[in-house]
Image: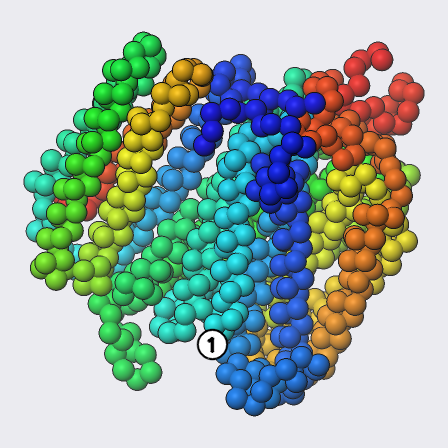
């Protein structure tokens, strides 16, 4: 007999979670450890360094500030996308999910100008430990954001089918995508002061 | 991704969806088991090559030595050169830990047994499960491919300590890093799947304190994998950057390589790698041992026909063990110059973490008291596990003391200690598990006589390999000597032990043949069994052997009692399964 896997959509009463949500929280826990390892490495290298540059002297703080605003706005759009589904308004959802993805792309474009500017001044990851950790941590963040943009675009372009067949499950998917998106946002909110402002 | 979340009946699927890119936890479990066993055999052969070199240094390898020409880069005239010896050491460790034992303990047993023991139709995320196996397969393929590089595979030890691992130009190390990258992704996907499955898919009545101990062990193991591996992922990214992009995360200022200043910006720290590596690799030790505890507990309860003694204290001990395993990592680093204050801290936590291990081991031993034991093959391996793990654990205590470690570090004592834990410890438990659950997977029992022929010589020979290591280590023989200490004055008194160990190792290889034969022969000719051949109590024995396609059970089980209701004086039989309702 073929049995369905329980709690793919409805929350399990004693944990209060559906499977996907718990899975995402666990994934994010591991992501915390991944970035935690990198932030710890940053602290370890900086404490052990003879001299360490001020981020603001080497990096473009105004551009990064703009990027911070963009990401926070994108997180708000993400919440609106989910809320629209909760309110049964698919057209509005579509608008917001594309705004989210678009803001993500805008962040990546600005970031690429920042990188290009560094390269044009011959500042590479191999230039110094500061640049090494800067490029590695922001680069890993960029990869995470890029993945998030792809998922948003997928749900924006092809989500309609699932919305018709299983609306609750689809809403859950957007909620879980949102959890990831906010986490990536949060990582930037920690990277910005750590690398640029201190 | 498709929109339906009920998989179609498995018998209608094409071959490649059923057996290759399957989402059925049972098929994935078997895929993991077979791949991991092949890697285990491969890692074992690498060790045999090393052992030959240690006992008969500078002599051509027997039989396979003839395959290599005089100009061969790594094995000229059949004699391995020191670089290749280093590669063997690095790859034996990597393959055994990351591609054999963990995938077997977690990937195979976790995948196959966990959903059955909690009464679930499958894992919570079947597609992630498939992705997890294939990430592991890709990682394994990259590692294996590195053996065909002209310079051979990674040669900086399984710990890959920089700066050596970075200044080494041969590409093997880069392969190693990318291979690890995939293995880590696999373990991440697998562990979050196991945790979600256990917490979400337990059937009605299966409360946390009714979970079989094996499930607890898998749950805690999965948390360790989930949280300890990412820092190594970070470290691997940093080392890839150092090797490929030319950064200096692990390259200190003023580094001199081959008499010339290294062309790097400097400012990094080699010690940083060790912190990140051991932050993973100490919890990893518990990843290796906890599933073994779980398997052994199941088998001991079943073959003593008694509830295991102190179930609750074993659960709490395992939880405490899991937590503490994150704060002991630097006991691998006493001699790095990180300072005596830090050493004192890690020495204290290390002494504390030995307590829960001892509680678990004691509880298992006390469980034997007063039992009329069934000496089946799985039980023999489980019983063999107890003293072997005991030796492994207790020999670890002197290593945890910073003062004693000054003498013992980087000697064969460390190798002996660690292998007692993992080889006659964990691997015996894995063998026990294979013999125990084989009837569930195939519907047939493995041959008992061949099982005993497998067990007894293995048990003796394991000690023949690892006991002399402890002796050599106490005499001060360094662990990485290419000639086994032949040219070192202080090693002369214990040099003869190299031959004892090597001969034991080759004999151990021979006595694995009954197992390999038994494994395949029993598929077709083993004694046919019904669903509960061991008269066991946990839920997996309610399912048919083998369990039905997608869904496992014919009806959804309900748990009515704890996992080990054996020899209840009021019950009609000496076992009362979890799925049996009160009063029926």
Front residue of this view, candidates B507 and B461: B507
In the rendered image, the quadrant that contains the C terminus of chain B is top right
Which residue is at 53% across, 69% downward?
B147
Q: Does residue A98 appear to the left or right of A5 in the view shown?
A: left
Determine crowd level at label 1: few under 14, some 14-19, many 20+ residues with C-alpha closer than 10 A.
few
Which residue is at 63% across, 53% downward?
B36
Which residue is at 46% across, 51% downward?
B182
Exactly how many numbered labels are in the figure?
1
Give the residue pinned by disc 1. B150
Q: Does residue A169 appear to the left or right of B559 in the view shown?
A: left
Which residue is at 47% across, 49% downward?
B184
Q: Is residue B470 above or below residue B184?
A: below
Most extreme residue toward the top is A87
Q: Position of residue B153 (x, y in %)?
A: 49, 70
Which corner quadrant of the image does residue A100 belong to? top left
Residue A99 seen in this snapshot:
yes
In the rendered image, the quadrant that contains the N terminus of chain B is top left
Which corner quadrant of the image does residue B311 belong to? top right
Q: How is the image coloured?
A: rainbow
Front residue of this view, candidates B328 and B484: B484
Q: Is residue B85 above or below residue B573?
A: below
Q: Position of residue A105 (x, y in %)?
A: 20, 37
Q: Position of residue B428 (x, y in %)?
A: 73, 53
Q: Does residue B572 appear to the left or right of B477 in the view shown?
A: right
Q: Position of residue B479 (x, y in %)?
A: 57, 72
Mark 1 falls on what kind of element?
A: loop
Residue B326 seen in this snapshot:
no
Please report, as a chain letter, where disc 1 is located.
Answer: B
């Amino acid at each position: 007999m073929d049995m369905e896997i329980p709690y793919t959509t409805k929350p399990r009463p004693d944990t209060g979670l559906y499977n996907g949500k718990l899975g995402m929280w666990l994934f994010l826990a591991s992501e915390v450890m991944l970035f935690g390892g990198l932030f710890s490495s940053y602290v370890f290298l900086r404490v052990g360094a003879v001299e360490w540059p001020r981020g603001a002297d080497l990096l473009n703080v105004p551009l990064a500030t703009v990027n911070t605003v963009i990401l926070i706005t994108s997180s708000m759009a993400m919440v609106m996308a989910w809320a629209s589904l909760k309110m049964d308004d698919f057209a509005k959802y579509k608008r917001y999910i594309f705004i989210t993805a678009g803001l993500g792309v805008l962040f990546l474009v600005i970031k690429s100008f920042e990188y290009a500017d560094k390269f044009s001044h011959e500042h590479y990851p191999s230039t110094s430990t500061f640049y090494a950790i800067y490029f590695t941590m922001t680069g890993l963040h960029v990869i995470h954001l890029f993945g998030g943009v792809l998922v948003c675009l997928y749900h924006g372009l092809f989500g309609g089918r699932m919305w018709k067949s299983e609306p609750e499950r689809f809403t859950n998917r957007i909620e879980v995508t949102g959890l990831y998106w906010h986490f990536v946002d949060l990582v930037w909110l920690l990277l910005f002061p750590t690398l640029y402002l201190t | 991704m498709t929109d339906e979340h009920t998989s179609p009946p498995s018998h209608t699927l094409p071959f490649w969806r059923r057996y290759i890119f399957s989402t059925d936890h049972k098929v994935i479990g078997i895929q993991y088991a077979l791949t991991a066993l092949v890697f285990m055999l491969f890692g074992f052969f690498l060790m045999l090559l090393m052992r030959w070199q240690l006992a008969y240094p500078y002599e051509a390898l027997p039989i396979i030595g003839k395959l290599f020409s005089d100009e061969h880069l790594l094995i000229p005239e059949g004699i391995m050169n020191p670089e290749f010896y280093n590669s063997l050491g690095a790859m034996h460790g990597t393959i055994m830990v990351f591609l054999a034992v963990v995938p077997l303990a977690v990937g195979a047993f976790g995948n196959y047994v966990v959903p059955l023991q909690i009464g679930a139709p499958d894992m919570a995320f079947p597609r992630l499960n498939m992705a997890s196996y294939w990430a592991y397969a890709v990682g394994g393929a990259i590692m294996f491919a590195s053996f065909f590089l002209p310079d051979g595979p990674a040669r900086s030890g399984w710990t890959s300590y920089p700066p050596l691992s970075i200044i080494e130009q041969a590409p093997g190390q880069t392969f190693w890093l990318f291979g690890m990258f995939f293995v880590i992704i696999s373990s991440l996907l697998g562990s979050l799947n196991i945790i979600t499955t256990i917490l979400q898919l337990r059937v009605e009545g299966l409360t946390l304190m009714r979970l079989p101990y094996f499930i607890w062990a898998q749950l805690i193991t999965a948390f360790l994998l989930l949280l300890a591996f990412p820092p190594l992922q970070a470290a691997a990214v940093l080392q890839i950057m150092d090797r490929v992009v030319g950064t200096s995360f692990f390259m200190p200022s003023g580094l001199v390589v081959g008499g010339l200043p290294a062309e790097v910006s400097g400012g990094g720290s080699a010690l940083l790698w060790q912190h990140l590596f051991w932050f993973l690799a100490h919890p990893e030790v518990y990843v290796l041992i906890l599933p073994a505890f779980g398997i052994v507990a199941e088998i001991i309860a079943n073959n003593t026909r008694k509830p295991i003694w102190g179930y609750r204290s074993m659960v709490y001990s395992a939880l405490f063990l899991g937590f503490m395993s994150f704060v002991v990592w630097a006991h691998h680093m006493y001699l790095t110059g990180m300072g005596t204050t830090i050493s004192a801290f890690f020495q204290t936590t290390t002494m504390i973490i030995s307590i829960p291990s001892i509680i678990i081991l004691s509880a298992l031993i006390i469980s034997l008291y007063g039992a009329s034991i069934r000496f089946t093959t799985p039980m023999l391996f489980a019983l063999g596990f107890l003293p072997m793990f005991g030796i492994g654990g207790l020999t670890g205590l002197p290593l945890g003391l910073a003062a004693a470690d000054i003498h013992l570090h980087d000697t064969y004592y460390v190798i002996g200690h660690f292998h007692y834990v993992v080889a006659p410890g964990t691997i015996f438990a894995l063998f026990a598990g294979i013999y125990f659950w084989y009837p569930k997977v195939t519907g047939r029992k493995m041959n008992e006589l061949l099982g005993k022929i497998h067990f007894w010589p293995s048990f003796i020979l394991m000690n023949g390999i690892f006991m002399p290591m402890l002796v050599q280590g106490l005499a001060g023989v360094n662990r990485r000597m290419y000639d086994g200490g032949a040219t070192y004055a202080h090693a002369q008194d214990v040099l003869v032990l190299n031959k004892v160990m090597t001969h034991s190792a080759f004999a151990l290889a021979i006595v694995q043949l009954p197992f390999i034969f038994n494994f395949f022969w029993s598929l077709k000719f083993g004694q046919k069994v019904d669903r509960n051949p061991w008269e066991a109590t946990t839920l997996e024995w309610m399912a048919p052997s083998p369990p039905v396609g997608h869904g496992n059970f014919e009806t959804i089980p309900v748990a009515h009692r704890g996992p080990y209701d054996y020899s209840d004086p009021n019950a009609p039989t000496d076992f009362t399964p979890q799925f049996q309702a009160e009063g029926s």
